[in-house]
Image: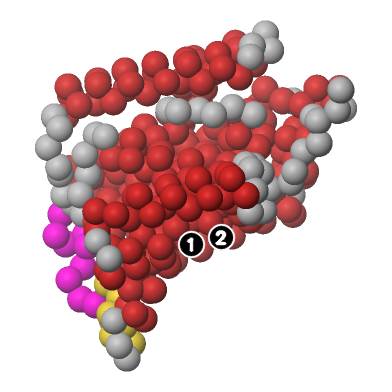
Amino acid sequence: MLAQQLTNGVLLGSTYALFALGFTLMFGVLRVVNLTYGFYFTAGAFVALLLTRSYSLPIWAALPAAAVTVGAIAVVLDWLLLARLRRINAPELSSLMVTLGAVLALYAAMTAWLGPDIRRLPAEVLGGEAMIFGPLRITQAQILVLIATAAMVTALLALMRLTPIGLALRAMAENPDAAGLMGIDTGRLAALVSFICGALAGAGGVLIGLNFNAIQPYMGEAMMLRGFVVIIIGGLGDIRGALIAGVLLGIIEVLTAGYISSGLKEAVAFAILVAVLWTRPSGLFGRTQTRRA
């Protein structure tokens, strides 16, 4: 029983980590809390639903197609909402309020268009068979979640650590003005970050929809709350911290639901968040910044 719960927690937490990776990358490089990020999560799930239902695409093809589509949507929304604010060096609160209004409008428009009802992926997409490993039972959907998450996390880490683009992104994260003076096109890099983050969020929406087989317009809202928990516990802008904190949150939620009460899993997660903020405000893996007069 415990082994199965831990396995389920790791699989769920890996999806949380994937979602939070884009969120923390956006904050780390662009220095903005973009609340439309939750909409990208919802959009990815609905794009995959459309592709599997209307075009009969297998889920392994619908997943990257949904990720790329949502990445393109993220670039457009970033250009419409945030590009001008970056050019005029508007305060961070401006971007927060603009994206808050935008995400409320987007959720309302999606609900009016598609309705509030929960939708489900076709049965043939999920695969009915499960693999048995001793006491563990793992479904095909869970295997896909694990493989896809591992592949995308590995690709992101390789991009950030092993390529010139990753070097430019790290430079922009440290000091965007200095990066611009060194010849780095910060505008194009901002669009690239938006695309990557949108793709990660969209893929996370597909995987969560696949794992729970429940898709509805406001699913991104609940995931945004978990995203905040993960990036704050892991450390704002810290990719390693987001990975570890995402997996830990998934395990904590599953164990709480399995051994205490399913209604308390959110409460336990946010209690841990408060405890971390009280004891280490920079997060478990974040760097403490010293303010000087």
* Dot 1 and dot 2 residues touching (CB under 8 Å): yes
Relative height, residue 98 to residue 268 (above, below): above
Q: Is residue 148 visible?
A: no
Q: Residues within 10 Å of mark 2 (few under 14, many from 20)?
A: some
Residue type marked 1: Leu
Q: Position of residue 151 (x, y in %)?
A: 51, 61
Q: Position of residue 114 (x, y in %)?
A: 16, 29
Residue 285: say if magenta.
Answer: no
The residue positioned farthest toward the bottom in the image shown: 134
Residue 127: say if magenta.
Answer: yes
The label number, if any, that marks residue 240 in the structure image: none
Q: Which residue is mark 2?
A: 244
Span shown in magenta? 122-130
The residue under the point 53% across, 56% down is 245
Relative height, residue 254 to residue 38 (above, below): below
Q: Which residue is mark 1?
A: 248
